[in-house]
Amino acid sequence: MNLQDIKGSYDVIVSLGSACNPAMLLKQHNLRRFSGPLDWCVSNSLSDVSRLLKNRFEGFMEIENMCLLDETNYFLNDGDPIYPGDEPTTPIKAYWVKDTYYNVISMHDFPVLPNQDWTVTYPSYKEKLNRRINRFLEKITNSQSVLFVRWAASYNQAVELHSVLSRIVKGRFTILILCPVNDLQNISEVNWGIDRVCAVEVPNKPFDNSTWEYVLNGITLTIENQ
C-alpha cells in the first residue's frame, strides 16, 4: 500500500510505539480519542509488541518482571506534564521502569516522590493500565476499521505484526509504519508488498510536525468517534 491507499476515515487510530511521538502527534492532529497501553512507553522492538498483542497483554507490567533504570523523565497525564503544587514551575520527575519480559519501558508513569520507593504508586498505575488495555482490546477487536501507527520497524517485523493482527481484529485494519532514516531529507514511500501495510521512509526527526502532517494528510476519524 502507499499513502494514497490509506487515506480515509477510520473508527479507531492507535499508536503501537516505538515511543511517545506517534501518540503525541496523533493527539495534536485530533486523530486520537483515548490513551493506549503503549502510548507513553518505549518499545524498541516491534517483535516484542507483536508478542504482547498475541498474548493479549497477559503478564504485561507485572511487578515481578519490572526493574528500575537509572534514567528519569517527566511525569505525564496523557502526555501533559504534571507540576507540584498549584504553581507550574518544573514538572515532577518520573522514573524509567522496564518490563523485562516484554522489553517495554515506562517513562512517564511513576513519579519521583521524596523518600518513597517507585513501587508506592504501582497499584494505581496498574489499575489505570488495565483500563487502557481493556479499552484498547475492545476497540481494535470490534471496530469496523482500525489504523495502527508505528514508528520504526523492519519488513520482517511488519509481516509478523500483520499476522498477529489478522487473528485479533475482526474488521478492516491498516498498518502505517514510519521508518526513520538518518540524514534523509525527503519522505519516500517503500513498497514492501504486504497486504494492509503502508511503509514510508522519513527523516529521523520523531517529533517533526511537517513529516507527520504529510503522512497523516487525508486521514480522519469517523463521525461516530468524534
Image: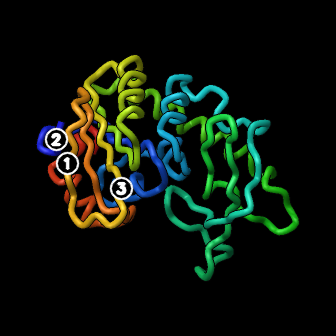
Q: Rounded to the nearest whole Å, what is the CA distance between mark 2 and mark 1?
A: 7 Å
The one of 221 and 37 positioned closer to us in this rendering: 37
Which residue sits at x=48%, y=42%?
Answer: 36
Q: Residue flagged by tag 3: what amino acid is it?
A: Pro
The one of 119 and 163 positioned closer to us in this rendering: 163
Mark 2 or 1: the one toward you: 1
Q: How far across and down, in percent of the image, does residue 66 sit?
A: 74, 43
Tell me which label, 3 or 1, sits earlier in the chain: 3
Q: Which mark is residue 198?
A: none
Which residue sits at x=28%, y=29%?
Answer: 173
Q: Residue flagged by tag 2: what amino acid is it?
A: Asn
Q: Is residue 113 left or right of residue 90?
A: right
Tell me which label, 2 or 3, sits earlier in the chain: 2
Q: Secondary structure at mark 3?
A: strand
Q: How far across and down, in percent of the image, does residue 188 sit?
A: 20, 53
Q: Residue 57 appears in which quarter of the rendering? A: top right
Which residue sits at x=36%, y=28%?
Answer: 159
Q: Which mark is residue 180?
A: 3
Q: Residue 116 appears in which quarter of the rendering? A: bottom right
Residue indicated by mark 1: 189
Q: Secondary structure at mark 1?
A: strand
